[in-house]
């Protein structure tokens, strides 16, 4: 078992976000990582796999935008973090947009995901952390690896950011695993919020199964994606399974839905499972409304371990910072066994 982390991920430290109609301190803070590191102990370093692994999933123009956005924001005479305020809800297309405000709107979909001075470097090394976890499994040294990724990734699409996410770590790992011949590949997302970016990237792809257990988007972010009738498009029809759950979902209600998700993973003949793990399903998470207890994270980990499938876990959300480290450590111990 391997746990991978790169400290450059701490350089993403936006000051605030727009939340429920007002400015609020940014929830996705470096304190999340410190909480997890204090609980899980020693980690392995990340290895640099280069930009090509990112552009295999993300539009190269979007990646170039991410690299330059904060510097362009400052060059325009702005202070603080770069954040958009206008979005093309219809007629979204490639345009030659010179002003940073326009490009922020072109490549994002919410006002909760500012680009800070260290965002590109952190997002880059978050993706490299995930890819290094894949290396450990692909190399045969372990059947399970945990990538302590931050910022998270599952809301980021091929050419857009949102939901605290910039590069889609799970999608990048899944695409690279397929390229290495490790398929069939499936992605299981068990974050509280639907992984809309991951779904979008593979929506028409018949080879990579995407399954998500999440809060009902009729009531929760990201609202517009993750409904049960979204099952894929074109050749990918049937390769997407959304399992939305109501507020107050506890462990007893969650476990049979997890079994349904894992049955779909097994039916795909999955050799490698990419797990988007969010601990924001915890009962005391400040921006979520499930009721899982710490013992439920152990039960979920044990159920996943019982599949016998090779698993690369990438960290997504979880914002009850004081409890986050213990929750993640409990899950990792159950999934991976003693170190």
Image (cartoon, rainbow, N blue to C red):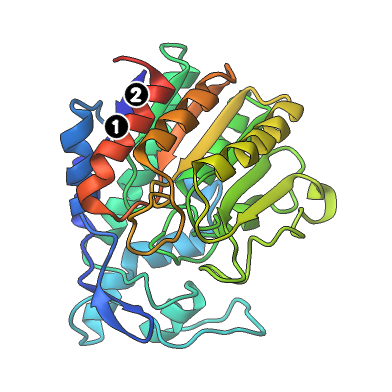
Q: Residue furthest front?
A: 252
Element assignment for label 2: helix
Give the numbered dot on residue 160: none
The image quarter containing residue 73 is: bottom left
Q: Residue at x 41, y 87 (%)?
A: 85
Residue 56 appears in view: yes
- Cβ–Cβ below 8 Å for labels 1 and 2? yes
In the rendered image, the vertical position of residue 256 relative to residue 167, given as above or below: above
Q: Where is 24 relative to 283, above or below?
A: below
**Left or right of residue 186, residue 276 in this image:** left
Whole-percent x, y for residue 197 in the image: 56, 58
Task: From the viewer's side, name the closer residue of 266 and 254.
Answer: 254
Q: Nearer the viewer, residue 244 or 172?
A: 244
* Quadrant in the picture for the C terminus: top left
Task: Characterize the local packing of mark 1: few (<14), some (14-19) or many (20 or more) Cα atoms within 10 angstroms.
Answer: many
Q: Position of residue 139 (x, y in %)?
A: 45, 15
Residue under label 1: 329
Q: Quadrant of residue 95?
A: bottom right
The residue positioned 43% from the left and 24% from the top of the image is: 335
Asked which quadrant contains residue 46, the reply is top left
| Residue matched to label 2 | 333
Q: Secondary structure at mark 1?
A: helix
Question: Could you tell whether 265 is left or right of 16 in the image?
Answer: right
Mark 2 burial class by Cα count in 10 Å: few <14, some 14-19, many 20+: some
Residue at 64%, 60% (x, y): give it: 226
Q: State whether residue 241 is above or below residue 310.
A: below
């Amino acid at each position: 078992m391997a746990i991978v982390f790169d400290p450059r991920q701490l350089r993403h430290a936006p000051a605030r976000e727009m939340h429920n109609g007002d400015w609020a301190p940014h929830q996705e803070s470096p304190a999340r990582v410190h909480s997890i590191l204090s609980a899980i102990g020693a980690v392995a370093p990340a290895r640099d796999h280069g930009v090509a692994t990112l552009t295999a999933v993300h539009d190269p123009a979007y990646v170039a935008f991410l690299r330059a956005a904060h510097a362009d924001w400052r060059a325009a005479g702005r202070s603080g973090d770069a954040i958009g305020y206008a979005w093309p809800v219809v007629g979204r297309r490639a345009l030659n947009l010179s002003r940073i405000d326009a490009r922020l709107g072109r490549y994002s979909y919410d006002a909760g995901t500012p680009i800070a001075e260290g965002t590109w470097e952190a997002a880059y090394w978050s993706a490299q952390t995930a890819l290094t976890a894949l290396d450990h499994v692909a190399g045969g040294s372990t059947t399970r690896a945990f990538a302590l990724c931050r910022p998270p990734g599952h809301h980021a699409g091929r050419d857009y950011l949102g939901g605290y996410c910039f590069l889609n770590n799970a999608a990048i790992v899944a695409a690279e695993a397929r390229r290495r011949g490790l398929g069939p590949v499936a992605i299981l997302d068990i974050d509280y919020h639907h992984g809309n970016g991951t779904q979008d990237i593979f929506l028409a792809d018949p080879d990579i199964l995407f399954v998500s257990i999440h809060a009902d988007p009729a009531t929760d972010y990201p609202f517009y994606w993750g409904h049960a009738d979204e099952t894929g498009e074109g050749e990918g029809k049937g390769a997407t399974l959304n399992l939305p759950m109501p507020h107050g979902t506890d462990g007893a209600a969650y476990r049979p839905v997890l079994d349904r998700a894992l049955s779909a993973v097994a039916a795909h003949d999955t050799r490698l499972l990419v797990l988007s793990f969010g601990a924001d399903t915890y009962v005391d998470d400040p921006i979520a409304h499930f009721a899982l207890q710490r013992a439920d994270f152990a039960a979920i980990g044990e159920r996943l371990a019982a599949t016998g499938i090779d698993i690369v876990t990438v960290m997504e959300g979880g914002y009850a910072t004081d409890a986050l480290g213990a929750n993640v450590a409990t899950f990792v111990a159950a999934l991976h066994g003693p170190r």
